[in-house]
């Protein structure tokens, strides 16, 4: 499998609107971060993880191939606001959206026009599938294990695929969830910034400690703010086996 970081930024993206700091003015493309999303692929299956407001821009350079599934971590705007932009893929049929019960219910409220009895032409054709933590699902030739983590007080989903796990927006995780991460070798996890405590996101030191609990061999940080600093400078601050991801980075997992 291969995984592509479509976006590695936090909810506001980088550059941050109105900011004139050196990072936001950087010409290094690795310092420009769209909202967090990823694409997991095998030779026959494509899974989109999250679908934020930048998804049209993120998918434009890629082949026009319908995702076999869209996995949603949670309902927050920066993770679901681009679902309507996937309507172009409906020329191939319904879009299969996988989410927990809370996210599924909230989608009915935020996108009610997609769930009317009589849909008007052009509406995205969404087929919702409810995910339950610890109940594995198979999409094509990929097996996915949903895991529950806490985004502040909000329970959200993380996903494990074999020895690869993708976690974003996590602040804490229950000890009871840790066994579901045993054997993970490649970990993608959020690390908002180096300093200044946040109530619902891990900082870099917290993310490093969590990765070491998991025992991952390599860890990539995502959901980053401009306060991370310049890409190269920030990476030099990390221990071996850890690195900041950047938009467009593709890894084999």
Image (spheres, grey):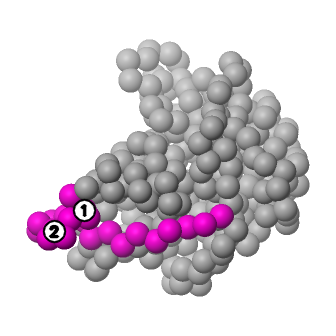
Residue in the image at 71% along x and 31% along y? 203
Q: Is residue 127 magenta?
A: yes
Residue at left 65%, top 75%?
136
Circle number at residue 119: 2
Sequence-wise, the earlier of marks 1 and 2 is 1
Taking the image as shown, residue 99 lies to the left or right of residue 58, namely right
Task: Determine the image quadrant of residue 209.
Answer: top right
- Regarding residue 96, the answer to whether it shows in the image is yes
- Verify CB contact (< 8 Å) between mark 1 and mark 2: yes
Alpha carbon distance from label 1 to label 2: 7 Å
> Residue beneath label 1, please?
114
Dot 2 alpha-carbon crowd within 10 angstroms: few under 14, some 14 to 19, many 20 or more: few
SS assignment at label 2: loop
Q: What residue sits 44% from the left and 25% below the top? A: 16
Find residue 28 and name its label.
none
Image spot of residue 63 (x, y percent): 37, 70
Question: Magenta stretch containing residue 184, yes or no?
Answer: no
Q: Which residues are magenta?
A: 113-133
């Amino acid at each position: 499998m291969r995984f592509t970081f479509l976006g590695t930024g936090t909810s506001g993206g980088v550059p941050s609107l109105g900011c004139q700091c050196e990072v936001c003015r950087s010409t290094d493309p690795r310092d420009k971060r769209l909202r967090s999303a990823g694409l997991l692929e095998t030779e026959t299956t494509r899974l989109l993880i999250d679908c934020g407001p930048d998804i049209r821009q993120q998918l434009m350079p890629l082949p026009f191939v319908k995702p076999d599934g869209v996995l949603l971590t949670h309902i927050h705007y920066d993770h679901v606001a681009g679902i309507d932009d996937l309507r172009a893929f409906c020329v191939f049929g319904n879009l299969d959206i996988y989410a927990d019960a809370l996210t599924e219910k909230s989608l009915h409220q935020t996108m009610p026009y997609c769930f009317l009895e009589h849909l008007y032409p052009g509406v995205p054709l969404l087929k919702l599938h409810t995910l339950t933590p610890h109940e594995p699902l198979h999409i094509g030739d990929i097996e996915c294990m949903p895991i529950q983590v806490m985004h502040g007080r909000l329970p959200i989903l993380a996903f494990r695929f074999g020895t690869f796990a993708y976690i974003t927006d996590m602040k804490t995780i229950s000890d009871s969830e840790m066994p579901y991460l045993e054997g993970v070798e490649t970990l993608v996890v959020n690390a908002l910034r180096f300093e200044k405590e946040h109530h619902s996101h891990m900082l870099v030191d917290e993310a490093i400690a969590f990765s070491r609990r998991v025992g991952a061999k390599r860890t990539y940080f995502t959901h980053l703010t401009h306060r991370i600093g310049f890409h190269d400078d920030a990476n030099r601050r990390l221990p071996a086996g850890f690195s900041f991801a950047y938009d467009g980075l593709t890894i084999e997992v």
